[in-house]
Each structure stands twice: as structure tokens, then as C-alpha cells.
Amino acid sequence: MVYSRILIVPTTEEEFNNKSIEEVQEEYYVNTYPKRENQFFRYKKRGIKFDSSKKTLLLFRYKKHLIALAELVNVKKYEESDDGHFGEYHLKDIQVLNKPVTNDELENIWGKIKYLPGNKPELDISKFPDFLDLIKCRVNSIKPLIS
């Protein structure tokens, strides 16, 4: 198994100015994050505890759909809030889902998922192969996810 943990990172319509799923994918996950040094994503709420011994896959959720995924390589917490942001996730191999995954599809694999404010649900890693089967035709390349 390649990953030790899989976490869902919920994002809000407020964070992305109520843009459509396609606009958010194109503007941020294709044209902004991959071009930044460390491919970072800034977070506004509580961050993720980073453990370099656990390879972590982040699934980005927007408007009740998984729209992108990436490997987490580091977490940088800011000393002070920078315009409402408290830190950043450093990412690798950002993949945009050309057909976003719905909550129903996700729950068919992992069962009911509890989304609580500030919570990043951790998913059962044993179900990762089922998830790969679901998304293999929805990403540009499955290779970064299995190597």
C-alpha cells in the first residue's frame, strides 16, 4: 500500500467566492497551486498534523464533490494569521478529477462520512484500491497515486 493515510480537506464556497466546481479546478488546482513553489494550498482553519513517516493523500472537497487530490509533503504553520490564513499544505502531484466524485460515490466505498466543522475526516486505507478503481478514468495519470 502506497499511502498510510487518506484525509478529506473540505473547502467552502466562501473560500472560492462561490465559483463553480470547474472554475475552482481550473483557476486553483490547474493554474495556481501547481505553479507555486511547494505547490502550496493555504488553509484558514485548523491544519493537519504532519507526520513525515506517514505518506498522506489529501482529497479536496468542494460543493459536496471531490474535485482534486494531492500528496501532502509538509505543513507550514504561520506564526500569526496572514489575512485569515493560518498555514499552508505543501503538495506534490496535484491531480484534478475531470469528473468530480459525488458524496454518494464516496460513501459507496467508505460508508457514511462525518463532516464536522474544522474536521478533516480520515478514511480507511484498506478501501484505497476501490477508490483507485473509481477514479482511474477521472484523472490525467494514476501513476503518481500508485508509485
Image (tube, rainbow, N blue to C red):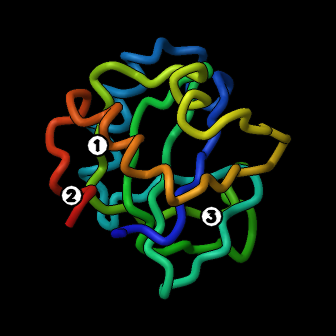
State left or right for residue 70 relative to residue 145.
right
Give percent across and percent down for residue 130.
Answer: 40, 42
Name the mark on residue 8: none
Taking the view exactly as shown, the residue that stands out farthest to the bottom is 53
> Relative to 21, does residue 85 appear above or below in the rendering?
below
Q: Look at label 3 and name its amino acid.
A: Gly
Secondary structure of residue under mark 2: helix
The numbered mark, 3 or 1, whose residue comes first in the sequence reads 3
Quadrant of the rendered image containing residue 124? bottom right
Quadrant of the rendered image containing residue 109? top right
The numbered mark, 1 or 2, whose residue comes first in the sequence reads 1
Total number of numbered discs in the rendering: 3
Quadrant location of the C terminus in the rendered image: bottom left
Residue at x 15%, y 36% (from the top left corner): 140
Quadrant location of the N terminus in the rendered image: bottom left
User: Where does label 3 land, which residue?
Assistant: 87
Distance between mark 1 and mark 2 Cα atoms: 9 Å
Residue at x 33%, y 43% (from the top left corner): 132
Give percent across and percent down for residue 62.
Answer: 56, 27
Name the mark on residue 95: 1
Name the mark on residue 144: 2
Secondary structure of residue under mark 3: strand
Q: Look at label 2 and name its amino acid.
A: Pro
Q: Look at label 1 and name its amino acid.
A: Gln
Kindly indicate whether the residue at mark 2 contacts the one at mark 1 (C-beta within 8 angstroms): yes
Distance between mark 3 and mark 1 Cα atoms: 21 Å
